[in-house]
Amino acid sequence: MDSRFNSSSETSRNKCAACFRQFNRMEHLVDHMRTSFHSVHEPTCGICQKHCRSFESLREHLIGPLPKLECARIFAVRGCSLCLAVFDSPNSLRVHRATCQLSRPVAAYRMFNSGTYDDLIHFECGRTRAPRVVAASCKMVGGGSDGSLDLCARVCLIDESERIIFHTYVKPQIPVTNYRYEIVGIRPEYLRDAMPLKQVQRKIQDFLCNGEPVWKIRSSGGNARILVGHGLDCLGLEYSQHMIRDTAKYPPLMKTSKLSNSLKYLTQAYLGYDIQTGIQDPYEDCVSAMRLYMRMRSQFHAVEDYPMASEAPNQNNFASWRQNELERMTPEQMLETSRSDYYCWCLDAKRET
Ligand SMILES: [Zn+2]
Ligand SMILES: [Zn+2]
Ligand SMILES: [Zn+2]
Ligand SMILES: [Zn+2]
């Protein structure tokens, strides 16, 4: 990608309008656009408008060890180091910081050292659509001969306003060989008469489906609820992928396309406080995941009729039979044609209005 030998007009013509990579030949830029899925939903530098795949790479661009100097200089004066947005003045940054910097929720584990708290019944009776979004998390104990097999032993569910709606210890299906007390605070007597895993899963699934048959739940959801969490596979739920928002698998929050950030890291970097110090609390994890979700969901992105590359009207956007036509486009026109390969959570907010 050495562009020093090109004339300046040619390099700017072959420069990706999103990530600014430069290509010697227009056809290479077309190839790049075909596989990059750039879109208005990518984390974008508020100063130079460069698109990044993740907030992690945007952070590097702005405040990493080797930032883009022009952007870093402005960002240092009026950029928010948590959400990475840029403001008009240091004063509007100060006003914003008061809402962006959150504080650690009060731990819940002392409240429930045994037994179950179940407010789901309340919602079942009311047959209400609220809450539309719930966050779940679980804590694991060890099974197997060396205690390394993860077994779900404690589950917590909260609503949008961070209220606990369900909490229980879980009786694992196989014997526990390591209670991991120092990490998760679980004692044998908490699990002895606890709710069996299958029953917990069924309860949560029913609450999430909210009367909709699970096979019928498509992206529109109907009455079904959105489930938020970090690494939700541990719960072993059978639920529609359309309704799951996992902060461990969401491209803008990941380290690389294959590597997740830990919830502890995400909370520290994007919400501004520490979690999981001392005995871990599933309530605290729920709150982190919910807050991260709300932050992603409240982003203002341009509205598109068909935001996803996988949607039918977009399927020929970069088709090989359009190669000549694509090579005649400007980089900006190509970016307008390009769509996201992941479902941006800002679309949840648009769907409800
Ligand atoms: Zn690009
Ligand atoms: Zn978006
Ligand atoms: Zn920039
Ligand atoms: Zn902020």
Image (cartoon, rainbow, N blue to C red):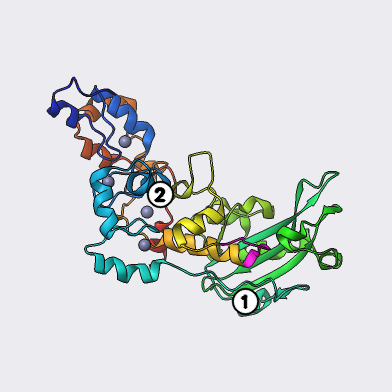
Q: Is the magenta stretch mostly helix, strand or loop?
A: loop
Would you name the residue on which mark 2 appears?
55
The quarter of the picture where residue 339 lies is top left
Res. 95 visible in picture = yes
Does residue 165 lie above or below 54 as drawn? below
How much space separates mark 2 and mark 1, taking CA atoms? 36 Å
Residue type pointed to by label 2: Phe
Q: Position of residue 51 (x, y in %)?
A: 32, 44
Q: Is mark 1 on a helix, strand or loop?
A: helix
Segment colored magenta:
275-283
Q: Residue at x 46, y 56 (%)?
A: 269
Q: Where is residue 146 in the image (x, y as percent from the top left)?
A: 83, 44
Characterize the local packing of mark 1: few (<14), some (14-19) or many (20 or more) Cα atoms within 10 angstroms.
some
Q: In which quarter of the image is the N terminus?
A: top left
Q: Which image quadrant shows ligand 4?
A: bottom left
Residue type pointed to by label 1: Phe
Looking at the picture, tell me which residue is in the foreground, 280 or 297: 280
Residue found farthest to the top = 5
Look at the image and say whether residue 297 sits in the magenta stretch. no
Q: Which of marks 2 and 1 is nearer the N terminus?
A: 2
- In the image, 251: left or right of 210? left
Would you name the residue on which mark 1 appears?
123
